[in-house]
Amino acid sequence: MTTPKIQSRFDIRKCFAQGESLVATTGMAFIAILAFAVGGVVWVSARTIDDSASAQAEEQILETSALIASQAELRLSDNDFPGLRRLLLDAVASGVVEECEISAPDIGVIVSSNAAQGTLSQMPESWQAAPDIAASILHNDETNRTTIHEPLIVNGKSGMALKVIVNRSLLVVGSDSIRMSSVIIMCVGLILMLLVYRRFRNRLGALAGIGEALRAAGDGERRIECLVVGERLGSEAVIWNTLLKEREEIEQVVVQRETLETLSGGVVESVGLPAACNTLTQGVLLVEQDLQVLYANGAACVFLRVNRQELINSSLNKVPDSAGIVEIVQSMLDGQGASRQIIELGDVEKIESQGAVLRVVITRVDEDEVPRAMVFIEDVTQQRLADQSQNAFIAQATHELRTPLTTIRLYAEEAVDAGSDDEQIRDKALNVINSETRRLERIVGDMLCVSEIEAGSLSIRSETMRPGQLFTELEEDYQAQAKDKSIELVFELPPKFPSIMGDRDRLGQALHNLVGNAIKYTPSGGSVHVKVHFADNNAMTVDVVDTGIGIEDSQQERIFDRFCRADDRRISQVTGSGLGLALARQIARLHNGDVEVKSEIDKGSTFTLTIPGTEQMAKAA
Amino acid sequence: MQIETNRHGAVTVIHPGGPVITENDATQLKTESFEVLGQTLGRFIIDVSEMTFVDSYGLEALVDITNELGAGGQSLKLCGISDTLREILAITDLISKFQQFEDVQTAVRSFK
């Protein structure tokens, strides 16, 4: 930006406001030049007219005097004095000649237009000849008179002369009147011009002011206060100032956008549909026939792992991760295939290397007969993994349900076969059937719980309860199973159970899952300890400590996911729904408690269920 | 600062092991997050249950990460926010820039 030059000299423009300086000085200069030019022309014209008129007057005087002289010579030769006098009087009467007389040097005035002079009535007999008398013209500028002396030859004798006095003012039409007229016309013209100037001064002032502002802007001036024009100069000035304000506002918007762009480090589309599309988590691409990408939102660039500036207006072919899309888009734009196609890129089994499973919907969109393709990209990795887990769960659940059902059927048949003959076999069969039925009940209960969690409707019926009975039943339920596996199952219970707030059935379900899991994943010869503690505020802590196979650190949080089991080859032969721990944690959290795990590979795991005390639960509620 | 990363299905959980109170901590968190972002296309959450405090470096790192996700129409998912961290985010008027979840499971489920 350049600063205005400092002028030390006097500048008349400073005496005027912006917008007026140029107009005022230009107007004044124009009027002065015009007045000078008109004055000069008038002066030259008048001078020329004067000269021309003088020359014509002199010529006329000479012709008149020559005519009078020739007529006078004729009349003098004829001695016709009356005719001569009449000639002189007629000459004076014509208005051109003021006075006219004929004289001789020795006689004096012979005949004159003035009646008081020249009293002779006939020709003198003699007069003194004067052959050296010459014609002459004398001008008297003071009186504006011209006196002409014309020698006469009468009867072949010289000596007489004609004197003619002419009033020049009567001959020369006054150039003064021309001057005066011109001056008057010029003054009237100038007055009219001033009136017109006053009328258009404001408008011209606005235009001149805008011109000055443009020149200043050309010199780098950007401050709006230096570029505005006085609004009293008219509508043009108001419009100019409005444009300046709008430009400043646009500049501010541009600066804001640039600032946002700089802060975000990328392209910012702050308004309209593009901005809205940019907030989508689904990728959106608009591709033209030559595979040129007309639009791509941020999510599309993330999914295609490409910079947005590089993608827009370039060919989709250049994007390495778009190979699967390009082929379909190309065939669709060529008019082949369906107008809507859906593909999935990536394999859920190869998430580690591929990063994601992308669902791509490609739709042909014709606009003004120009074929284009809209490409929608969605990350469905998590859904596909969930589908996979759910499918595994269904297979596992089917197996889980079939196992107790088969056992029940076999033992029922055995009991029927034994009849009343062998009570021992029948009792054993009934016990197994009873146990398997309860197992079946738990599995079905877990499944129902899962569906309630999915629906968000899993809830607890919180009531005051003493959990002692719960642990007694738990011990009874699992003691036989532990014995079968040669696992030592020990319940370390407090001598007295305080009352707690909770849902007895749900807590029983959670504890069953924890103890059942511990026995399931503990090899023969191991042990499972269930330790129950109560804090002063009656908060209950249940530690289920096993000497099982243990869980890797990376899997310790994952095992609480629904339908998920630890990714461990050692448990491939162990059946399980992948729901137990998820349900246990969900139930604990519904009681404002939690289930946490600490584990070491091949050493065992400790699952800790905590249920807050009655007061804490009441506060939480 | 120790930062653990765990996979929950297709979702990666970044678990900073303590408060982010130095430039190094913030840079480490940002680097780890950007790396995971590139690998998972944004399917990650930050478990801030042990990030009990953040200074300006930490806040800047969190904002940078959510801005980077914002380019793809996403925002950073935080779970296990402590009261102190929540207050810091609220005072600095940044809380709306993040999605908050009670626990990891809920946050992971939000990707479905």
Image (cartoon, coloured by chain):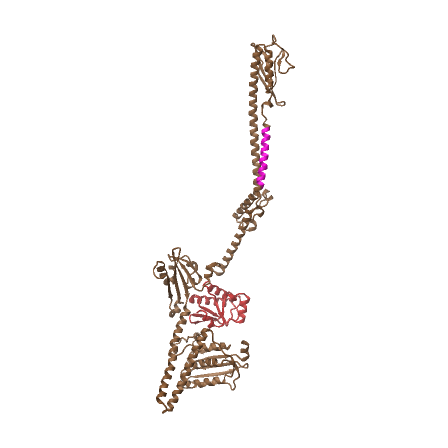
Chain colours: A brown, B red
**In this view of the protein, which residue sits in the foreground, A170 or B86?**
A170
User: Number of labelled discs?
Assistant: 0
Give percent across and percent down for residue B89.
53, 67
Image-quadrant location for residue A418? bottom left
Furthest residue in direction right, as rendered:
A116
The answer to whether residue A556 is seen in the rendering is no
Q: Main secondary structure of the magenta part?
A: helix
Q: Residue A184 lies in magenta, yes or no?
A: yes
The answer to whether residue A224 is seen in the rendering is yes
Furthest residue in direction left, as rendered:
A336
Q: Is A357 placed left or right of A190 in the picture?
A: left
Give percent across and percent down for residue A49.
56, 27
Magenta-tinted stretch = A177-198
**In this view of the protein, which residue sits in the foreground, A24 or A232?**
A232
Q: Is residue A61 above or below residue B33?
A: above
Q: Residue at x 44, y 86 (%)?
A: A476
Furthest residue in direction bottom, as rendered:
A421
Q: Is A147 placed left or right of A565 in the picture?
A: right
**In this view of the protein, which residue sits in the foreground, A206 or A140?**
A206
Give percent across and percent down for residue A349.
38, 70
**In this view of the protein, which residue sits in the foreground, A179 or B70?**
A179
Give percent across and percent down for residue A506.
47, 80
Q: Residue A445 lies in magenta, yes or no?
A: no
